[in-house]
C-alpha cells in the first residue's frame, strides 16, 4: 500500500506559505480587477514626439509584419505612419500605413524581405515622433535556437520590469513568446496594452515576438470561445463565447496578433471575429501557434455540475467520464486539421514546437488559497478529454515540444494517452507576476518518482484521468516571489536536445551564483516527444546522397504514424503494431516511397538503402 501525502492547511502554510494577499481574488471574479485590486489605469498624455509607444514584429516567408502601437492621436493629427529601414548608411522609406481605430495600431507589411541580415528600422509619425529598433536576421546558422517564454503579466505589479529586461538582454534569445494575460484590466485593454509596451519595449523592439491573447486580455475571468459562435452572458464565460462586443475583441486581437505571420486559413467566425493560428520557421525550427481557447466548448449546461461552479469539480465521488461529453470541442476541426498538416510539413525545419495559451493537462491541485483543493478544473486543457487526446496525439506525430503558460504554476510534464509517457512533453512557464497562486500537491505519491531534486514527481493521473509524468514544478512560496519568473528553451539542432530552464524573477542571471528553480533545467531529446514504446521496428533506412532527410511512416490504411527529419543518414523506425507499412524518404519531387515494408520483431534487423 502506498503512503499518502498529508495535506492540511498547517502543512501547506509551513512549507508553501504563499496564499494570495488579503483582498486579492481570482482575476475577473468581481469586475475589472477583482475586489481590492488596483485602480484602473490612466492613459498618459505624451508629447507628440513620443506618440509611438512600441512596436512588435515577425518575419516569415520573406515577409516582414510589424505593428506599431501609438498613444491616442488628437483630432486633426495625421493618421499616416511611415516605416524606414537603413540601407548603405541611409534611411529609406519602405512602407506607409494608416492608423486603425479604436486602438491606434499601425500595421505594416513588407514583402520580399531580406532575412539574411540584420536591419535597423525606425517608425515615424508626424514631424518628430520616432521609434527605432533592429529586425534580426533569420538565425539559421546558429546551432542552438533559444526561445524566451512568458505568461501572466498581472496587474498587482504595475511597475517596470528591469530584472527581466536585464536577464533577457544577457541571455539573448532568438524569439520572445508571450502566451497570454499580457493584460488583466478587464474591458480597458488599450491602456494596459500601452503599459505592457512600456514594460517590455526595450526587448521587443529588437527581437521577433509572438504575443497571443488569453482570457484576461479579452476581458474575461475564463474563456471558452465556442468557436466564436455566440456571446457569453457573463465575464465568467462558462456558458461559452466572448462577453465583450465584437469590436472590442477585434481591437485586442489586432493589437496583439496583427504582426504575426499570416493565419493558416483566414476565416471570419459567426460573431465577426477572425483567427490567428499560424505556422512559421525561425532558425530552422518550425513553430505552430494555436488558439486553444477560441474553439473550446463552454461547460455550463453541458456537463453535470459537481462543485461550486460549472467548471470546478469538488465532489470526491464524481465520475471522470461523465464530463467527457460528446460534442465538447477543444481545438476544433479546422485547427486540428491545421496541426495535422503542419506536422507533416518539414520544409526548412529540423525540430518542431507548438506555442499556445496553456498545456493539455490539469496539473494544479490547490487553487487560490491554502487548503483550496480542486479535484478538476474544466478551464484547463485537460478537458474535454477526447479533444485533449487528439491535440496531444497530433503533437507527438511530429515529435513536437509544447510551450504554454496561464496556469500560475511552472511545470515540465511528459504526457500520456494510453500509457504514461507515450506522448510528447510540455513546459508551462511561470507567471511574470503570480498573485493568484496554484500548487502541485497530489494526495498520493507516485510509485515511480523520476527526480532526485523534487519529492512529488513521477506518474499521476490528473482530475480528468489524463496520464502525466511530472518531472519538475515550482510551487509558490513567500520567499520566491510566489514562484514568479519566466522560461527559456534551448533547441539544439545538431544533437536534437531540448533544454528547458525556469528562471525566478529575483535572480540575476549575470551572477555566477544564479540558480534556477529546483528541478530545472530539464533536458530531453527530440525523439522523447513520441515516447510510446515500440512493439516492432521497420528495417533500418540507410540514405546515400542526402543528410538529415525527412522520413514519414504510414500504416496499411494510409494513416500517417509520424513524420520526422532524422539526424544523420540512418534511422530505424519504430512502430506500434505488427504489420505492413509505407515509408516515404525525402521531400518534394525527389521523395522516394517504399511500399509493403513488413515490420520486424525488436530483436531482428535488416537494412534498406535509399539512394538520392
Image (cartoon, helix red, strand yellow):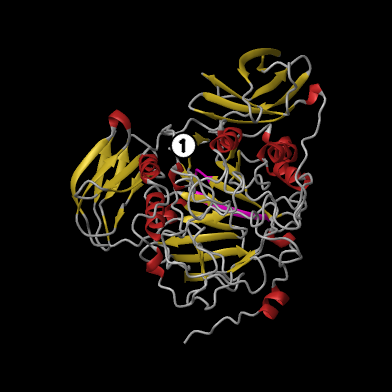
Q: Is residue 342 left or right of residue 491?
A: left
User: Secondary structure of the magenta portion, mostly?
Assistant: strand
- The quadrant of the image that shows the C terminus is top left
Circle 1 Cα neighbour tier, 10 Å, few/some/many (<14 / 14–19 / ≥20): many
Do we see residue 60 in this rendering? yes
Report whether 348 appears left or right of 364.
left
How many circles with numbers are drawn on the protein?
1
Q: Nearer the viewer, residue 301 or 217?
A: 301
* Side of 177 relative to 18 (left or right): left
Report the residue marked by disc 1. Answer: 279
Residue 63 image offset from top left, x and y in percent:
52, 24
Q: Tell me, yes or no, whether the highlighted magenta stretch contains residue 77.
A: no
Q: Is residue 30 left or right of residue 318?
A: right
Corner quadrant of residue 44:
top right
Residue 496 in sight from this viewpoint? no
Q: Position of residue 115 (x, y in %)?
A: 55, 25
The stretch in magenta equals: 492-503
x and y, in percent, of residue 84 in the image: 66, 17
Quadrant of residue 213 in the image?
A: top right
Is residue 84 positioned above or below 454 on the image?
above
Q: Nearer the viewer, residue 308 or 421?
A: 308
Give the quadrant of residue 587: top left
Q: Residue 510 at x, y = what percent?
A: 76, 49
Asked which secondary structure carries label 1, the reply is: strand
Amino acid at each position: 500500500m502506498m503512503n499518502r501525502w498529508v495535506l492540511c492547511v498547517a502543512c501547506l502554510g509551513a512549507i508553501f506559505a504563499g496564499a494570495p494577499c488579503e483582498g486579492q481574488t481570482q482575476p475577473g471574479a468581481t469586475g475589472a480587477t477583482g475586489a481590492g485590486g488596483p485602480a484602473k489605469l490612466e492613459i498618459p498624455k505624451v508629447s507628440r514626439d513620443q506618440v509611438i509607444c512600441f512596436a512588435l514584429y515577425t518575419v516569415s516567408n520573406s515577409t516582414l509584419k510589424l505593428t506599431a502601437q501609438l498613444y491616442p492621436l488628437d483630432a486633426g493629427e495625421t493618421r499616416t505612419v511611415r516605416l524606414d529601414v537603413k540601407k548603405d548608411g541611409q534611411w529609406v522609406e519602405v512602407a506607409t500605413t494608416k492608423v486603425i481605430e479604436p486602438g491606434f495600431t499601425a500595421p505594416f507589411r513588407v514583402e520580399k524581405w531580406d532575412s539574411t541580415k540584420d536591419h535597423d528600422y525606425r517608425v515615424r509619425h508626424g514631424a518628430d515622433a520616432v521609434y527605432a529598433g533592429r529586425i534580426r536576421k533569420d538565425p539559421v546558422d546558429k546551432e542552438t535556437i533559444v526561445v524566451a517564454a512568458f505568461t501572466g503579466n498581472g496587474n498587482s505589479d504595475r511597475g517596470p520590469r528591469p530584472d527581466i529586461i536585464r536577464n533577457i538582454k544577457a541571455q539573448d534569445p532568438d524569439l520572445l513568446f508571450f502566451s497570454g494575460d499580457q493584460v488583466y484590466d478587464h474591458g480597458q485593454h488599450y491602456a494596459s496594452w500601452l503599459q505592457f509596451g512600456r514594460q517590455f519595449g526595450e526587448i521587443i523592439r529588437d527581437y521577433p515576438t509572438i504575443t497571443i491573447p488569453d482570457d484576461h486580455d479579452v476581458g474575461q475571468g475564463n474563456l471558452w470561445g465556442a468557436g466564436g459562435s455566440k456571446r457569453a452572458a457573463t465575464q465568467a464565460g462558462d456558458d461559452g463565447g466572448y462577453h465583450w462586443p465584437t469590436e472590442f475583441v477585434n481591437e485586442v486581437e489586432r493589437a496583439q496578433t496583427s504582426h504575426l505571420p499570416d493565419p493558416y486559413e483566414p476565416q471570419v467566425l459567426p460573431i465577426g471575429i477572425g483567427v490567428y493560428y499560424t505556422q512559421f520557421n525561425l532558425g530552422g525550427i518550425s513553430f505552430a501557434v494555436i488558439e486553444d481557447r477560441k474553439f473550446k466548448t463552454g461547460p455550463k449546461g453541458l456537463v453535470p455540475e459537481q462543485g461550486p461552479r460549472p467548471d470546478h469539480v469538488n465532489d470526491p465521488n464524481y465520475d471522470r467520464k461523465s464530463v467527457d461529453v460528446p460534442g465538447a470541442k477543444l481545438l476544433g476541426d479546422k485547427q486540428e486539421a491545421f496541426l495535422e498538416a503542419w506536422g507533416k510539413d518539414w520544409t526548412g525545419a529540423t525540430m518542431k514546437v507548438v506555442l499556445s495559451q496553456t498545456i493539455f493537462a490539469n496539473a494544479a491541485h490547490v487553487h487560490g488559497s491554502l487548503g483550496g483543493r480542486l479535484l478538476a478544473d474544466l478551464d484547463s486543457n485537460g478537458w474535454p478529454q477526447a479533444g485533449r487526446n487528439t491535440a496531444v496525439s497530433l503533437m507527438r506525430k511530429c515529435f513536437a515540444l509544447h510551450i504554454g503558460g496561464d496556469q500560475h504554476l511552472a511545470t515540465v510534464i511528459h504526457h500520456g494517452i494510453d500509457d504514461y509517457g507515450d506522448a510528447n512533453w510540455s513546459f508551462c512557464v511561470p507567471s511574470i507576476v503570480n498573485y493568484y497562486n496554484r500548487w502541485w500537491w497530489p494526495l498520493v505519491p507516485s510509485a515511480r518518482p523520476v527526480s532526485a531534486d523534487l519529492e512529488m514527481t513521477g506518474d499521476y493521473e490528473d482530475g480528468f484521468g489524463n496520464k502525466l509524468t511530472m518531472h519538475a514544478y515550482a510551487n509558490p512560496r513567500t520567499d520566491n516571489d510566489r514562484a514568479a519568473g519566466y522560461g527559456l528553451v534551448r533547441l539544439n539542432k545538431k544533437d536534437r536536445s531540448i533544454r528547458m530552464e525556469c528562471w525566478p524573477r529575483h535572480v540575476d542571471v549575470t551572477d555566477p551564483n544564479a540558480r534556477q528553480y529546483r528541478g530545472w533545467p530539464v533536458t530531453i531529446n527530440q525523439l522523447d516527444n513520441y515516447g510510446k514504446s515500440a512493439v516492432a521496428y521497420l528495417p533500418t533506412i540507410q540514405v546515400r546522397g542526402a543528410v538529415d532527410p525527412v522520413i514519414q511512416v504510414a500504416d496499411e490504411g494510409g494513416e500517417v504514424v509520424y513524420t520526422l527529419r532524422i539526424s544523420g543518414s540512418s534511422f530505424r523506425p519504430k512502430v506500434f503494431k505488427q504489420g505492413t507499412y509505407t515509408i516515404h524518404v525525402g521531400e518534394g519531387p525527389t521523395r522516394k516511397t517504399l511500399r509493403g515494408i513488413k515490420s520486424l520483431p525488436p530483436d531482428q534487423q535488416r537494412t534498406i538503402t535509399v539512394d538520392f
